[in-house]
Image: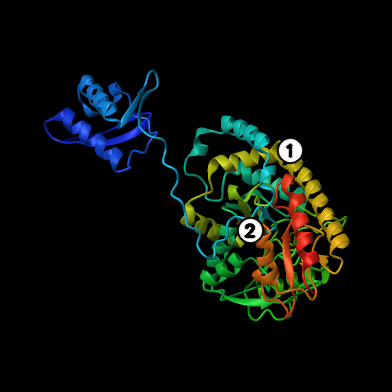
Amino acid sequence: MSETWAISGLDLHLEVPGTRVRAGLEEALRTAVSSGRLVPGTRLPSSRTLARDLRLARNTVADAYTQLVAEGWLVACLGSGTWVAGAPAPPPATVPRADQAAPARYDLRAGSPDLSSFPRAGWLAAARRALVAAPDAAFGYGDPRGRPELRTALAGYLARTRGVRAEPGRIVVCSGFGQALPLLAEVLRDRGVTAMAAESHTLPSAAQAIARAGLRRVVLPVDQAGAVLDGLGGAGALLLTPAHQFPLGVALAPGRRTRAVAWAAETGGLIIEDDYDGEFRYGRQPVGALQARSPERVVYAGTASKTLAPGLRLGWLVLPAHLVDDVTEAKRAADRQAGVAEQLTLAEFIRSGGYDRHVRRRRLAYRRRRDRLAAALAAQCPRCTVSGIAAGLHAVVDVPGGPSEADLVAGARRRGLALEGLSTYGPSDAGRCALVIGYGSPPDHAFTGALARLCALLAAAPG
Ligand SMILES: Cc1ncc(COP(=O)(O)O)c(C=O)c1O
């Protein structure tokens, strides 16, 4: 039996049995096609290449190809080689699960920026510059904290724009906050922390990460001044969204910021500052990073998921010195390091000013959308109240005396509009009906339609 790999056009693995070589080759190809291993439209290696790789005479392969073309298994195109016959099979029709409605035409759920605004041209240009300039060693296994180019660029950017006290050596680049929080929770648990306090309303995945690490979650109510910090219940860590509570949208009041930092200093506890949308603040009052008040007791966590795109999976931690080694080791154990091409590109995008320009452009666009949302609701649904809109890409819209959240969300679905109720993120007061509106999500061309449907839904809601 001869067995080999050819590398012309595609890797082709064929096992050609026994003595009757041509018949064996034909049969191996028929089996590969009929079993679906070689799908219609797959290009085969040239007869010369396959013959060399299988150590056969070229004519043997050419004759086998001719025979299979005659039988209709393959097609030969003059000048462009031999292909598996037939149109590519359409993907199998998926039967939607009962709980899985067809995709909505309009999406106002929180969590995503406008993906159509991804700065493709600027990103491509930065990628080209970064990959040309990178040393060969950049493409090897590297420092689990991430590429020095990116950590240096982030340190400067975060200090300049968010007041973070950052130095490259204390930054660990992660696969988003979605990886950063589980890594931190694991490290803290291994150091003896048994409980983490977190705001009552939070990302479901954050609550899951705390539980998966085996930590008890101490639930902190949120009022108009942000998280209420009276009952920290023996927690060794405190997860906060101080600049813009997610999803309620309030900023942590100055007194509470002081209280949080004092708690950390008194107890040796650690604050995790999730600054997921800190770049998008619209009012005149800047809310800088809490980390600047106590860099040894606060971990600053940032992400590219709102400014650029969640699909990049790029986030970063700025760590107190005493945590750097353990978090670096946890990152190494998890997945070695973040992908180098994206890291180098983001570093160049920041260094060249492209990131600042993009953020400023998006800030203006999202502020306009926010203003349109507030104005449309005030005009068409005056009983609704809008809150949490000094920053970010989402708003909380209360519908007093309205139907249940579930009914409202289902009604929206029937109008082709995807929405989420506030209770998705935490317990709501009895009878409260509120929506978390992600006004950043739709592409520009769909925003007007999405807003019109939302207003029509709310104006028609009983109450
Ligand atoms: C509160 C909060 N934190 C962090 C993130 C970012 O998560 P990641 O960086 O894993 O995309 C999000 C994204 O929706 C968020 O809502």
In the image, taking residue 383 as reference, residue 346 lies left or right, namely left
**Residue at coordinates 62% horizontally, 34% vertically from top-left?**
124
What colouring style does the render use? rainbow
Dot in front, 2 or 1: 1
Q: Circle 2 — which element?
A: loop
Residue at mark 2: 319
Label 1 C-beta lies within 8 Å of the nearest ligand 1 atom: no
Give the crowd class for mark 2: few <14, some 14-19, many >=20 residues within 10 Å. many
Q: Nearer the viewer, residue 60 or 112?
A: 60
Q: Is residue 227 above or below residue 283?
A: below
Q: Nearer the viewer, residue 167 or 99?
A: 99
Q: Circle 1 — which element?
A: loop
In the image, taking residue 27 as reference, residue 203 lies left or right, namely right
Question: Which comes before the other along the chain, label 2 or label 1?
Answer: 2
Q: Quadrant of residue 19?
A: top left
Q: Is residue 174 above or below residue 83?
A: below
Q: Position of residue 260 (x, y in %)?
A: 74, 71
In the image, taking residue 413 as reference, residue 31 lies left or right, namely left
Residue at mark 1: 353
Inspect this view and state whether residue 29 appears: yes
Q: How many badges with numbers are in the image?
A: 2
Residue type (three-letter) at the residue carrying disc 1 = Gly
Give the crowd class for mark 1: few <14, some 14-19, many >=20 residues within 10 Å. few
Q: Is residue 259 above or below residue 244?
A: below
Looking at the image, which residue sits at the far top?
A: 79
**Residue at coordinates 53% horizontally, 66% vertically from top-left?**
186
